[in-house]
Image (cartoon, grey):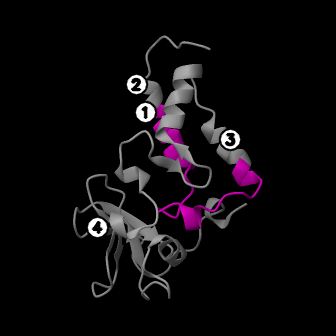
Amino acid sequence: MSECCAVNKPRSEVPAVMACPVCGTRSKQVDTLTVKSLVRHLRFGAPPTQYYFCDAAGCDVVYFPLDPAAPTFRRADLWVRVGVKELEDSSLVCYCFGVTRGNIRDEIQRTGKSSMAERIKAEVKAGHCACETKNPSGKCCLGSVTREARLALQSAPTTIERT
């Protein structure tokens, strides 16, 4: 199983949560490996500071540093689209296995439920996840997948057409 989905890692002495300097959203620490893996122009490594992930949909900032002299990275700086900052059905909810909002909504419309979280859990158990290098948050996507399925179920029509 990937380290990202395992027991919580020990916290360093820097703040675990900081407010995004642009929108004020409480933002959690993100591992340097995640920043180095997803920011386009960091060929030789990330600056030596703690970075935080802003998940606010209306904010263009993705990663901001503890050290104000270090660069802030925005959506356009990443190799991937940041699904939590977008509303399209094509937005990724699970980066390791390519699950989109649309996949979850389509399955719910067809079957009345979502099995995506169970499928992802099986893949994680098999050691196939790489959230720390693929997901901009650097965290396991299961919470996002479950939340997205709950929202889709709430907005689904009461009658499900089965094929």
Q: Quadrant of the N terminus?
A: bottom right
Amino acid type indicated by mark 4: Ala
- Separation of residues labelled 4 and 1 (CA atoms): 26 Å
Residue under pointer 1: 151
Instruction: Kindly report which numbered mark, 4 or 3, lies closer to the viewer in this rendering.
Output: 3
- Is mark 3 in CB contact (under 8 Å) with mark 1? no
Crowdedness of circle 4 by 10 Å Cα count: few (<14), some, many (20+)? some
41 is higher (above) or lower (below) than 52: below
Magenta part of the chain = 123-151
Indicate yes or no whether the magenta region holds residue 140: yes
Residue drawn at 47 percent across, 26 percent down: 153
Quadrant assignment, res 53? bottom left
Say what secondary structure mark 3 lies in. helix
Determine whether, in the image, residue 8 is placed left or right of residue 147: right
Counting residues from the start of the chain, the first of labels 4 and 2 encountered is: 4
Residue under pointer 2: 155
Crowdedness of circle 3 by 10 Å Cα count: few (<14), some, many (20+)? few
Query: In the image, which disc is placed on residue 119?
Result: 3
- Is mark 1 in CB contact (under 8 Å) with mark 2? yes
Indicate yes or no whether the magenta region holds residue 141: yes
Comparing 4 with 12, the one in front is 4
Counting residues from the start of the chain, the first of labels 3 and 1 encountered is: 3
Crowdedness of circle 1 by 10 Å Cα count: few (<14), some, many (20+)? few
Q: How many marks?
A: 4
44 is higher (above) or lower (below) than 32: below
Residue under pointer 4: 19
Residue 119 placement (x, y as % from top left): 68, 41
Counting residues from the start of the chain, the first of labels 4 and 1 encountered is: 4
Counting residues from the start of the chain, the first of labels 3 and 2 encountered is: 3
Say what secondary structure mark 4 lies in. strand
